[in-house]
């Protein structure tokens, strides 16, 4: 019964979003405030209905109601509760429902926090947001119904892919989707602004928090996914330039560009039209990601095919929104007046270069991801575009960008003194040079480019610290004065420094793990030992262990350094009987800077076990740095100025509350 | 099963979970040759996997191809000859790094082209906006706007 109510709520949500799409847009057109005001309650109601539908599906998974086809296909009564819940979105139908849930959540947030938006802008934003909801709700209701029943109901479910039964992966999709769908908000603002034919500083100020929220969620989602790949896939890789990964990277880079161009639009009134275009592109790339992953075009070499009808419907949605918004842009953008003077050496000049490089980086990922698909479709030629392509194209574009990152925040608006800015970075440059020398001394046998990468990483971190030091006048005034200045700094300044410094930490991690890791592949009988990176690994034995829904072969590996026991690692090979699949669980010992990573392989013919071990230098920094970046986004999001909104809006709000 | 795999695609990196990779027994005795074999293996795609190199894959076919690579190296082939040998049998699809040719010109040069166009646009924007105030005087409305902008800037001193 609850399942049927959920289905009913979903259909109702569709009806409500049709109203939310049509009525406020009509109201904005006719300047009829009563029609415009329909948008807010409609957005809240739509959200409530989708929450109910999502709750109903979650309930079916929690109680293991196998009469629901989706539960039967993706769950099992023996599965731990956390994975019963994450199973809701570990499949096509449920993940699309999650997509729509987050979409509705953002719409509800505009209706909740957007009281100070001009009426017509708010009405149009909610209408555009609802049009996306209509498209995806139609898609779910007609091609991907998650509430389909089975009669007779089976006694047991078929289980969830063991790979998805993982704590980090369980919450990776919600974050990723919050990022993808978060860009729908900036998209709606962009399209609404084009309809209004007006973009001012306050528009850019309203768009920034939504961009930040989406960017920060996407950062967390991507970092979680890469962390999962690192500790699950069993050879310590963290990024594979896989098309599915690229699908999430493209909106992230475009979103990063948008985050920066919106600052110029807000502070200098320039790059408005470009900011609108970026907002459209960031969401288009999110839709493209959804299409690539959901339609099955990327998995055509695999032995399974996703329902082609679904693929063509998503392609239709993609073409409608991307084509529609770009046409609107081509039609209306020339009417947007751009102001502002651009000096080449200025904060806005630096941000312009930032945007140019980020766009080119996005383009290299875009070309590398889609080229093989197009070549196959148009010329029937099959090629592979693997990681080396991106090393040759993406990296050379990204490295100059990284070099410029510390300089940007030190340049003033309008006309900057580049010499003064460079002087403030002298210490950072010195530290980077020391890092270069130290890396050469420590790893002179490693790849020759790696020390330069390390210098770049230190340059980024030290550059971020230099900016803070300069702003609080560290050492040039008494410490108490610096402390007082530090407390007065807007949160966005701290957020920027954290995000830019975090980027440097990520770079250090990537350089360390790719250039300086060690590898050991050997076979060991019980009692035998092998050495890696100064550690002696001894396989004490291999035993059996029963898990909740699997059984596992467990290797007992003692780790000694200078004959002293430092750790006992237990890598596993798990066998999931319900799903009839195997999964390797590496054992990792970390000291925060390096990981000792041990994998138990197959039993060889002579009864010995294949043991693989890696010493991954600086690997944990990748995710520490990622967390810093996300934290920087969060702190910026809490900046008072974003909460207050634009000054004109604040006045309008005051008037409104005085009238009440 | 189809759904399970489809849902897996939702996650990052669709890769076979189990690992075997290089079996110690496969390795060549000569460490220099083995190093070359590993590097070549990292650049060859496993045909039945999702975007995995044969060095990373535990699929049977990947193991066979690793053996082929090592056989060719033992027979005295250069790296280029090994690649040619494999491509002649499996097509360009096996190469992780696509070869530069008419079909891939746009692929390899595309990013540089975008960078050039982007650079040109940036130069244009800066030139146009730098010269404009020299040729046109500000209208009163623009002057007022400028004053407001400056005021705005003063209020938000030290921001982005």
Image (cartoon, coloured by chain):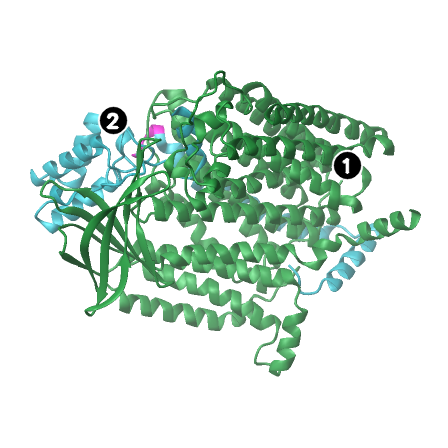
Q: Is residue A357 visible?
A: no
Q: What SS does tag 2 mark?
A: loop
Callouts 2 and 1 on one subunit:
no
| Label 2 sits on residue | B91
Q: Is residue B13 magenta?
A: no
Disc 2 chain ID: B
Outermost residue to the bottom:
A478
Outermost residue to the top:
A151
Quadrant showing the N terminus of chain A: top right
Kindly indicate the quadrant of the structure image that contains residue A100.
top right
Which tint was used for chain B? cyan
Report whether A332 appears left or right of A386. Answer: right
Write the start and end of the magenta stretch as one range.
Answer: B99-103
Q: What SS does tag 1 mark?
A: helix
| Label 1 sits on residue | A40
Residue A136 — which label?
none
């Amino acid at each position: 019964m609850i399942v049927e109510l959920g289905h009913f709520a979903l259909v109702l949500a569709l009806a409500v979003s049709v109203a939310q799409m049509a009525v406020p847009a009509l109201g904005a057109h006719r300047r009829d405030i009563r029609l415009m005001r329909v948008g807010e309650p409609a957005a809240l109601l739509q959200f409530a209905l989708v929450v109910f539908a999502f709750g109903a599906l979650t309930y079916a998974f929690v109680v293991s109601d196998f009469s629901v086809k989706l539960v039967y296909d993706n769950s099992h009564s023996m599965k731990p509760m956390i994975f019963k819940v994450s199973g809701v979105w570990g499949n096509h139908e449920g993940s699309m429902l999650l997509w729509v849930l987050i979409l509705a959540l953002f719409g509800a947030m505009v209706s909740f926090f957007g009281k100070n938006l001009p009426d017509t802008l708010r009405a149009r934003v909610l209408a555009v947001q609802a049009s996306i909801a209509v498209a995806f709700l139609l898609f779910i209701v007609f091609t991907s119904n998650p509430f389909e029943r089975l009669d007779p109901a089976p006694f047991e479910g078929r289980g969830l892919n063991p790979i998805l039964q993982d704590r980090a992966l369980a919450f990776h999709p919600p974050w990723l989707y919050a990022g993808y769908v978060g860009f729908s908000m900036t998209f709606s603002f962009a399209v609404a602004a084009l309809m209004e034919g007006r973009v001012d500083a306050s528009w850019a100020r309203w768009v920034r928090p939504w961009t930040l929220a989406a960017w920060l969620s996407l950062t967390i989602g991507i970092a979680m996914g890469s962390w999962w790949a690192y500790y699950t896939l069993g050879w310590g890789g963290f990024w594979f330039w896989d098309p599915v990964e690229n699908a999430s990277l493209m909106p992230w880079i475009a979103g990063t560009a948008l985050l920066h161009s919106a600052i110029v639009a807000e502070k200098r009134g320039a790059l408005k039209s470009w900011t609108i275009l970026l907002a459209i592109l960031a969401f288009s790339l999110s839709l493209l990601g959804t299409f690539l992953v959901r339609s099955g075009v990327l998995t055509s070499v695999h032995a399974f095919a996703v329902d082609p009808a679904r693929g063509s419907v998503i392609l239709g949605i993609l073409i409608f929104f991307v084509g529609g918004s770009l046409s609107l842009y081509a039609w209306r953008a020339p009417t947007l007046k751009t102001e502002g003077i651009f000096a080449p050496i200025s904060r806005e000049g630096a941000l312009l270069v930032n945007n140019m490089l980020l766009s080119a980086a996005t383009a290299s990922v875009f070309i590398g991801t889609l080229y093989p698909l197009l070549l196959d479709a148009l010329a029937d030629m099959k090629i592979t575009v693997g990681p080396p392509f991106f090393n040759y194209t993406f990296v050379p574009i990204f490295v100059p960008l990284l070099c410029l990152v510390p300089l940007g925040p030190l340049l003033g608006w309008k006309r900057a003194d580049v010499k003064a800015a460079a002087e403030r970075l002298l210490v950072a440059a010195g530290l980077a040079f020391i890092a270069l020398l130290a890396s050469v001394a420590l790893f002179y046998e490693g790849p020759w480019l790696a020390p330069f990468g390390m210098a770049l990483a230190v340059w980024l971190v030290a550059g971020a610290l230099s900016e803070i030091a300069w702003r609080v006048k560290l050492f040039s005034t008494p410490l108490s004065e610096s402390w007082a200045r530090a407390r007065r700094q807007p949160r966005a300044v701290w957020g920027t420094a954290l995000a830019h410094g975090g980027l440097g930490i990520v770079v250090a991690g990537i350089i360390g793990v790719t250039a300086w890791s060690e590898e050991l592949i050997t076979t060991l009988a019980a009692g035998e030992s092998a050495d890696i990176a100064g550690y002696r690994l001894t396989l004490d034995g291999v035993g059996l262990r029963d898990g909740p829904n699997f059984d596992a072969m467990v290797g007992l590996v003692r780790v000694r350094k200078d004959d002293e026991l430092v750790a006992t690692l237990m890598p596993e090979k798990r066998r999931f009987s319900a799903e009839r699949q195997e999964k390797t669980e590496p054992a990792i010992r970390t000291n925060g800077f390096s990981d000792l990573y041990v994998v138990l392989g197959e039993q060889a013919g002579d009864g010995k076990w294949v043991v693989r071990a890696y010493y991954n230098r600086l690997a944990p920094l990748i995710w520490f740095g990622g967390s810093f970046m996300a934290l920087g986004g969060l702190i910026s999001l809490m900046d008072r100025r974003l909460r207050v909104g634009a000054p004109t809006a604040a006045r309008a709000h005051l008037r409104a509350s005085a009238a009440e | 099963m189809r759904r399970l795999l489809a849902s897996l695609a939702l996650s990052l990196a669709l890769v076979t979970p189990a690992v075997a990779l290089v079996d110690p027994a496969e390795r060549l005795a000569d460490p220099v040759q083995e190093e070359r074999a590993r590097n070549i293996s990292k650049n060859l795609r496993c045909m039945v996997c999702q975007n995995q190199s044969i060095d990373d894959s535990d699929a049977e076919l990947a193991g066979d191809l690793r053996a082929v690579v090592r056989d060719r190296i033992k027979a005295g082939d250069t790296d280029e000859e090994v690649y040619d040998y494999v491509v002649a049998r499996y097509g360009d699809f096996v190469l992780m790094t696509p070869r530069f040719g008419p079909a891939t010109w746009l692929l390899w040069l595309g990013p540089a082209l975008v960078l050039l166009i982007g650079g040109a646009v940036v130069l244009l924007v800066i030139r146009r906006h730098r010269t404009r105030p020299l040729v046109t005087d500000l209208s009163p409305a623009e002057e007022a706007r400028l004053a407001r902008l400056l005021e705005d800037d003063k209020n938000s001193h030290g921001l982005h």
